Image: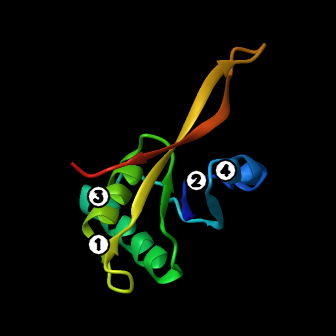
Amino acid sequence: MKLANCTLHTQTALKEQFASFGVEIGDEILGFEVAISDTAETIRQKAAEVIDLVLCGGEDGILVGGLTSAAYYLIIEAFETKSEEVDSYLRVFEVVTERIRDENDRFVFILRGIREIKPA
């Protein structure tokens, strides 16, 4: 299964780990920053544009990371926008990480898997 990278970070270093979970992550970073001045509608429009790109790219779903409004709206748009090519909705997955603190008390994130997010 191929997922579009809708996070804010490259996943290149983790390609082998993602492959062990049965997924390939796209190289292009499609996640986006949210400005303090962005309204909910602005964020949702950005998300809609990303989902349109994903649908045109032929991925099976999206990988989101973080608990930001950008991720929420990407999820909403993915669940509401049907691909006419395959007559289905995009699948949505989140990164599952373990957070540990290093010797400087900073968080280090360790990839442990992916989890599918399903609409209610």
What residue does disc 2 label? 8
What residue does disc 4 label? 18
User: How far apart in space, not on screen, are marks 3 and 1 (Cα)?
Assistant: 9 Å
What residue does disc 3 label? 76
Which tag, 3 or 1, sits closer to the chain's start? 3
Which tag, 3 or 4, sits closer to the chain's start? 4
User: How far apart in space, not on screen, are marks 4 and 2 (Cα)?
Assistant: 17 Å
Labels 2 & 1 near each other (Cβ < 8 A):
no
Q: Residue at x 44, y 70 (%)?
A: 50
Secondary structure beneath dot 4 equals helix
Label 2 vs label 1, nearer the camera: 1
Q: Taking the image as drawn, is residue 8 in sight?
A: yes
Secondary structure beneath dot 2 equals loop
Which tag, 1 or 4, sits closer to the chain's start? 4
What residue does disc 1 label? 81
Label 3 Cα neighbours within 10 Å, binned few <14 / some 14-19 / many ≥20: some
User: How far apart in space, not on screen, are marks 1 and 4 (Cα)?
Assistant: 26 Å
